[in-house]
Structures are given as C-alpha cells and as structure tokens.
C-alpha cells in the first residue's frame, strides 16, 4: 500500500480534457508549421559555391555560399539580445566556399566555411525563408 503522502486525488475530467486538447494542439500546430514547404526532399552540395535544395512542395532553391554566410544566424553573427546583425556583409568574400556541410537532427544544416566559421545552424525553415525572400526581391 502507498503511503498517504503519495496519494493524490484524480484530476477532474475538465482538467484532463484541457490537457488532451492542449497536447493535440501542440502536435497538430507543430505539424502544420513544419508542413511540406519546409521539408527538404533533396539537398545537394552542387559545387564549392552553391547549395541546391529541392523542397517537398516541388520548389527548388539555389543558395550561393557567400549569401548564406552573410545570413549566418549564430550568436557570433547576430547579437542574441537585440537581434542586430553583427557580421558586416562586406567582410564576406564572393569567393567564399562551402568546405563541408552536415545535417543537424531532422531540422537544420551546419556549414564549415572556407573562412573558418562553422557555428551557424541554419534551420530548414530559415533556409526556406531566405529562398522565398530572395525570390520576392527578384520579382520586385
């Protein structure tokens, strides 16, 4: 028999329903946010200067190494408190290369750049946003 100090009343049916509703919301909202638009189907390191990602919604994006490096989201390149970009874009050479690339979990890529930088984690969501933003800018 359990000591009385360990026994607690069962939660009310209303509380249980709220908990179940909350968990469903978390699961479905996460799935919707991830969605096909940010699920890569193919990631290809085309050459030293180019990355190609084919997305689940049949969108294909080309990324130049120098542009990706300038958009690095790491704490060395972006102030964690203010969100201000610390990295000055003009300090990144157009000749910058992708020396290596690795997948981080099921959600991101990490690059080792020819300038020695390697701390940025580029989520698939962020990569897709960069692509969509570049496309929008090229049509205006």
Image (spheres, rainbow, N blue to C red):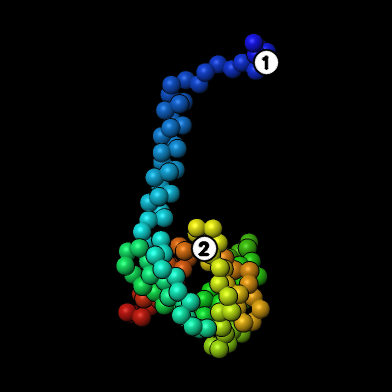
- How far from the left and from the top, in percent, is residue 105? 54, 58
Toward which corner of the image does residue 73 lie, by quadrant? bottom right
Q: Residue tagged by mark 1? A: 5
Q: Is residue 79 visible?
A: no
Toward which corner of the image does residue 90 lie, by quadrant? bottom right
Lower sequence index among marks 1 and 2 = 1
Tag of residue 31:
none
User: Is label 1 or label 2 in front?
Assistant: 2
Question: Residue shown at 65%/70% (left/top)?
Answer: 76
The N terminus, quarter of image: top right
Toward which corner of the image does residue 43 lie, by quadrant? bottom left
Instruction: Examine the rendered structure and indicate whether residue 86 appears above or below residue 11.
Output: below
Question: Residue shown at 61%/75% (left/top)?
Answer: 112
The C terminus, quarter of image: bottom left
Q: Is residue 28 left or right of residue 8?
A: left
Question: Residue shown at 46%/68% (left/top)?
Answer: 127
Instruction: Examine the rendered structure and indicate whether residue 34 appears above or below residue 68.
Output: above
* Element type where label 1 sits in the image: helix
Q: Residues within 10 Å of mark 2 (few under 14, many from 20)?
A: some
- How far from the left and from the top, in percent, is residue 33? 41, 54
Q: Nearer the viewer, residue 81 or 75?
A: 75
Question: Residue shown at 61%/85% (left/top)?
Answer: 91
Tag of residue 108:
2
* Element type where label 2 sits in the image: strand
- How far from the left and from the top, in percent, is residue 29? 40, 47
């Amino acid at each position: 028999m359990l000591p009385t100090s360990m026994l607690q009343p069962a939660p009310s049916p209303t509380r249980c329903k709220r908990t179940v509703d909350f968990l469903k919301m978390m699961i479905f909202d996460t799935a919707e946010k991830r969605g096909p638009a940010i699920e890569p189907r193919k990631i290809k390191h085309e050459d030293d200067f180019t990355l190609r990602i084919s997305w689940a919604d049949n969108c294909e994006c080309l990324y130049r190494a120098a542009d990706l490096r300038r958009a690095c989201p790491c704490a060395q390149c972006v102030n964690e408190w203010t969100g201000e970009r610390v990295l000055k874009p003009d300090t990144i050479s157009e000749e910058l290369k992708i020396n290596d690339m690795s997948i981080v979990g099921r959600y991101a890529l990490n690059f080792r750049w020819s300038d020695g930088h390697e701390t940025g984690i580029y989520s698939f969501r962020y990569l897709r946003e960069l692509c969509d933003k570049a496309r929008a800018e090229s049509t205006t």
